[in-house]
């Protein structure tokens, strides 16, 4: 895990938000950072490699598959996590209880 992934994991693991979030979960041909099956919620923590033309195309393809499967995808940058972990966790919490 990257440091930003680790920081998020420390805040969502062990049912801290009232639901289970397995990490490095396989969905189709993809591995997502965190997945809450009860809420059909995918959380991705994106590093620099996601911010290239190829990265954007790859993520769009992944997200389209997730949507086809009825899943919601939340994406956060490494910088968002490291600068505003509480805010990131709040967004995840809101998504869990929508």
Image: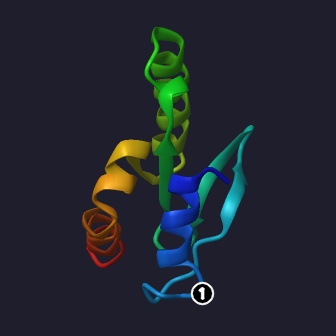
Percent position of residue 95, x then y: 31, 67
Percent position of residue 36, x then y: 54, 69
Residue 30 occupies quadrant: top right
Query: In this orientation, does residue 27 appear?
Result: yes
Q: Residue at x 32, y 75 (%)?
A: 93
Neighbour tally class for label 1: few under 14, some 14-19, many 20 plus, Cα within 10 Å? few
- For the image shown, how many numbered marks are present on the structure? 1
- The colour scheme of the drawn protein is rainbow
Q: Does residue 94 sit above or below 26 in this rendering?
A: below
Name the residue tied to disc 1: 14
Q: Quadrant of the C terminus?
A: bottom left
Q: Choose between 91 and 77: the one closer to the eye.
A: 77
Q: Does residue 50 sit above or below 5 in this rendering?
A: above
Q: Residue at x 45, y 20 (%)?
A: 56
Q: Quadrant of the N terminus?
A: bottom right
**Which residue is the extreme one toward the top?**
53
Position of 36 compared to 31: left or right?
left
Position of 70 compared to 31: left or right?
left
Percent position of residue 55, x then y: 52, 20
Q: Residue at x 60, y 53 (%)?
A: 33
Query: Is disc 1 placed on a helix, strand or loop?
Result: loop
Residue 86 occupies quadrant: bottom left
Q: Does residue 68 sit above or below 43 in this rendering?
A: above
Q: Does residue 87 sit above or below 11 in this rendering?
A: above
Residue 58 occupies quadrant: top right
Query: In this orientation, does residue 77 appear?
Result: no
Q: Residue at x 26, y 72 (%)?
A: 94
């Amino acid at each position: 895990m990257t440091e930003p992934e680790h920081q998020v994991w420390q805040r969502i693991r062990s049912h801290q938000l009232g639901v289970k979030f397995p990490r490095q979960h396989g969905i189709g041909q993809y591995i997502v950072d965190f997945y809450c099956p009860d809420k059909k919620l995918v959380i991705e923590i994106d590093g620099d490699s996601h911010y290239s033309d190829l990265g954007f195309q790859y993520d769009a393809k992944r997200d389209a598959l997730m949507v086809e499967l009825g899943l919601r995808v939340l994406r956060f940058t490494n910088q968002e996590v490291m600068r505003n972990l509480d805010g990131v966790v709040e967004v995840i919490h809101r998504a869990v209880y929508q």
